[in-house]
């Protein structure tokens, strides 16, 4: 097994794109930053609101700030070495090609199913070789063992596939956090496949 | 004909080809938001009615629900 220093040195040269900086995106970004993924490209149009704090990686004094700006500050408080490129904009089918061209892996971290579908369709067509890691099904609490990762070609879906967020089935910190970290863990698995091949022959 | 549907072998009785739209109806996929791939290539929603699945194709129907 490699040392953490060897992994960090390898991951330093990797770029991960994160579409959305809410419950999935903010927690996934922090996990990847702490592990030492060298560059993160984070896109979100929204501002931090009090309702976000039950699950998103922001703090009370950041309410009202653009999420991407607050997240960059929080990432740098944990790991100042990470290069964080942010765009405060709405991801749409017209800008995906520009935003995520340099990424090794793209993380889908939106809230709405419509946006998830749009990103996966468009990014799969523009970048058929880039893996996409997405989240689907994480509302409520308990039942941790129903959360899993399913692989469809180079598309990876994390979640339970059934628990949709609604007014009576809210997204909460633990399950959203688990899925966000499942996304981060899947990203690492994909990036480190190459580490196994190139630098650490078995 | 035989196809692979979501990583499992599947027999489509009495047909040599089927549109994506008819396959979704046949298999009662009712989720509103789907991503569909045939042999690794994404098929856009607008093309479901005109895209044909042939024998031995690898079809993936991935449903997406809100939350994040």
Image (tube, coloured by chain):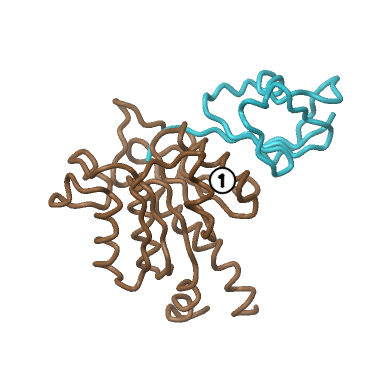
Chain colours: A brown, B cyan
A149 to A139, vertically: above or below: below
Badge 1 is on which residue? A123
Q: Residue at x 41, y 33 (%)?
A: A112
Number of marks in picture:
1
Side of A5 relative to A97 (left or right): left
Residue B8, given in percent of the width and then of the height, sits at 71, 38
Residue A104, given in percent of the width and then of the height, sits at 54, 61
Q: Residue at x 56, y 61 (%)?
A: A190
Q: Secondary structure at mark 1?
A: helix
Side of A10 relative to B37 (left or right): left
A154 to B28, vertically: above or below: below
Name the quadrant containing residue A82. bottom left
Residue B7, given in percent of the width and then of the height, sits at 69, 41
Side of B12 relative to A96 (left or right): right
Q: Residue at x 21, y 45 (%)?
A: A53
Instruction: Locate the C terminus of chain B and report the quarter of the image it occupies.
Output: top left
From this viewpoint, which residue is outermost toward the left?
A61
Name the quadrant containing residue B24. top right
């Amino acid at each position: 097994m490699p040392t953490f220093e060897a992994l960090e040195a390898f991951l330093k040269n990797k770029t991960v794109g994160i579409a959305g900086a809410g419950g999935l995106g903010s927690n996934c970004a922090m996990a990847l930053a702490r592990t030492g993924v060298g560059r993160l490209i984070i896109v979100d149009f929204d501002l931090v609101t009090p309702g976000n704090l039950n699950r998103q990686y922001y703090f009370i004094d950041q309410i009202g700030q653009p999420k991407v700006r607050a997240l960059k500050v929080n990432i740098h408080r944990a790991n100042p070495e990470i290069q964080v490129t942010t765009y405060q904009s709405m991801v749409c089918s017209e800008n995906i090609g520009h935003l995520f061209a340099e990424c090794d892996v793209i993380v889908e971290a939106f809230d709405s199913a419509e946006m998830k579908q749009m990103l996966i369709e468009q990014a799969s067509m523009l970048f058929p070789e880039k893996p996409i890691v997405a989240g689907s099904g994480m509302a409520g609490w308990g039942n941790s063992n129903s959360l899993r990762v399913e692989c469809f070609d180079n598309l990876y879906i994390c979640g339970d596939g059934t628990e949709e967020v609604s007014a009576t089935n809210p997204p909460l910190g633990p399950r959203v956090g688990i899925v966000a970290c499942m996304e981060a863990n899947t990203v690492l698995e994909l990036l480190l496949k190459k580490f196994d091949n190139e630098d650490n022959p078995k | 004909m035989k196809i692979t549907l979501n990583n499992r072998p599947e027999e489509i009785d009495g047909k040599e080809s089927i549109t994506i739209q008819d396959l979704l109806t046949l298999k009662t996929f009712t989720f509103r938001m789907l991503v569909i791939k045939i042999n690794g290539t994404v098929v856009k929603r607008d093309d479901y009615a005109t895209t044909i699945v042939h024998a031995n194709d690898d079809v993936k129907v991935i449903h997406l629900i809100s939350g994040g």
